[in-house]
Amino acid sequence: MPGHVPVLKEEAVQLLLTDPNGTYVDVTLGGGGHAAAILESLGVDGRLVGLDCDPAAIDHARAMPPAPDPRFVAGRARFSEIRPALQGLGISVVDGILADLGISSIQLDDPARGLSYTASGPLDMRLDPSLPRTADALLRAIDDDELLRVLRELGEVPRPRAAVRAIRRALAAEVTVTAETLRKALEPLYPGPARPRRLSQVFQALRIAVNRELDELESLLHEAAHLLRPGGTLCVIAYHSLEDRIVKNTFRPPRPYDPREPIPESPWVPLTKKPIRPSDEECRRNPRARSARLRAARLKAEAA
Ligand SMILES: C[S@@+](CC[C@H](N)C(=O)[O-])C[C@H]1O[C@@H](n2cnc3c(N)ncnc32)[C@H](O)[C@@H]1O
């Protein structure tokens, strides 16, 4: 199975671990790269819970390092389910939470999941197969205005109206649309060297909508403030500007325009004034790291 190269691994682990014998959660286990690095730095009494909404990621982690390790346990959960998932393991407070958002190379490169415009399989795109709607079903359920919003806001897709028309034609022509038919429908809109980027933008926008990724992120940020011990750290690696903005505004809410308005309180103390970006060397070795931004914050003592 092709692997996933963890992004900003050393930087994330360094910010995350405040106590080598503490309890940590990697909520985006994926290929287990960050989890393995956390375990390397943990003491004998440290504990790591690895969660992911994709059961394939859990099977993968159980079959190879970081497992088997008595300090490690893996389980399936979405961000919005993190509290009951930890409660099921008898954990109510943790020292640190890591979220490395988006999808792994393992998922992207699996043609059956329809996550990439180079895939040939059905247009599924669900990271969690228990979600009710595939991308194909979502496209058939939403109207043109909503599809336009998805393409504009989640993908910043150029020529979004033309893209909506092309997608509608593809849906009308097939009972079940595949990633390949969607790609072929969109290709004429985006000629030239920008084509791969444009197709990626459309596919990314649909994936974010199918998996409700922004809602899930909001939910995680909310839950983290209830799960971390005072002084505990939340580290988030984002690959999309909307996600990064949500994290940034949660860690340090924007000041109101009206100076008479009260400045919103935040339970967080940001540990990264600006996001940490991968070095040129890391981007050269792993081009998928290019858009990564790591932000971390500590939970204020009085907020727990
Ligand atoms: C970028 S990959 C993580 C890679 C991992 N850090 C590594 O080193 O291999 C993101 C992972 O997060 C998972 N994921 C995305 N959204 C999620 C959500 N709402 N709840 C739980 N897992 C999610 C995906 O299934 C994917 O496996």
Image: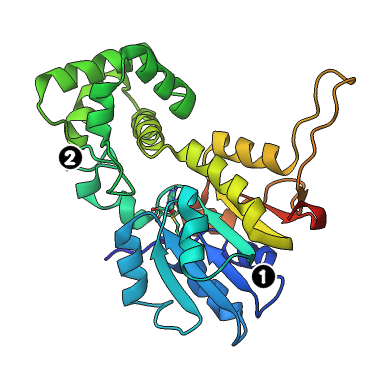
List x then y, in percent, for residue 59. Answer: 30, 68
List x then y, in percent, for residue 105. Answer: 36, 55
Residue placed most toward the observer, 259 or 158 = 259
List x then y, in percent, for residue 176. Answer: 13, 31
Q: Amino acid at mark 2?
A: Pro
Left or right: 213 with respect to 190? right
Question: For the residue labelled by badge 2, is the local secondary structure a helix, a strand or a loop?
Answer: loop
Residue 237 shows up from this direction: yes
Q: Amino acid at mark 1?
A: Leu
The quarter of the image holding the N terminus is bottom left
Left or right: 57 with respect to 287? left
Mark toward the start of the polypeptide (1 vs 2): 1
Ligand 1's quadrant: bottom left
Q: Which class describes the residues within 10 Å of circle 2: few (<14), some (14-19), or many (20+)?
A: many
- Mark seen at residue 17: 1
Residue placed most toward the observer, 291 or 196 = 291
Answer above or below: position of 248 versus 92.
above
Label 1–label 2 contact, CB within 8 A: no
Residue 186 shows up from this direction: no
Asked where in the image residue 296 lies, by quadrant, the reply is bottom right
Q: Which class describes the residues within 10 Å of circle 1: few (<14), some (14-19), or many (20+)?
A: many
Q: Which residue is mark 2?
A: 122
Residue at the spot 81% in from the left edge and 54% down from the top edge: 302
Instruction: Name the colour scheme.
Output: rainbow
